Image (cartoon, helix red, strand yellow):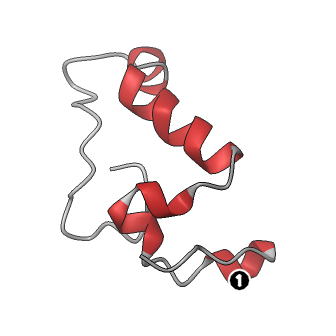
Amino acid sequence: MPCCMDVSKKLKIGNLCESSLEELWNNPFIERIRQIHFQERYEEILLCSHCGNWWYLGKKPKKR
């Protein structure tokens, strides 16, 4: 899971026993998540759109 708030494991990125850390880090799903965050489009990821931690960065996800 790419987020510590994902306690229900909704955003699975792979298995470290089956893939290298480099492979998991560079997989298309994670690349997409990083791009969305970089562009501050948090509302496009359901888990992120409800995140209460964006205040820490001075950001606020748009309401869905």
Q: Nearer the viewer, residue 50 or 30?
A: 50
Res. 38 image quadrant? top right
Quarter of the figure with the C terminus: bottom left
Q: Is residue 31 above or below residue 23?
A: below
Residue 33: image x %, image y %?
A: 49, 41
How many residues crowd around disc 1 within 10 Å: few (fewer than 14), some, or many (20 or more)? few
Q: Is residue 29 above or below residue 61?
A: above
Q: Secondary structure at mark 1?
A: helix
Q: Nearer the viewer, residue 20 or 27?
A: 27
Q: Nearer the viewer, residue 33 or 26?
A: 33
Q: Disc 1 residue type?
A: Trp
Report the residue at 34% width, 64% height from top: 46
- For the image, the number of numbered tags is 1
The residue singled out by tag 1 in the image is: 55
Report the residue at 48% width, 63% height from top: 43
Q: Is residue 62 left or right of residue 29?
A: right
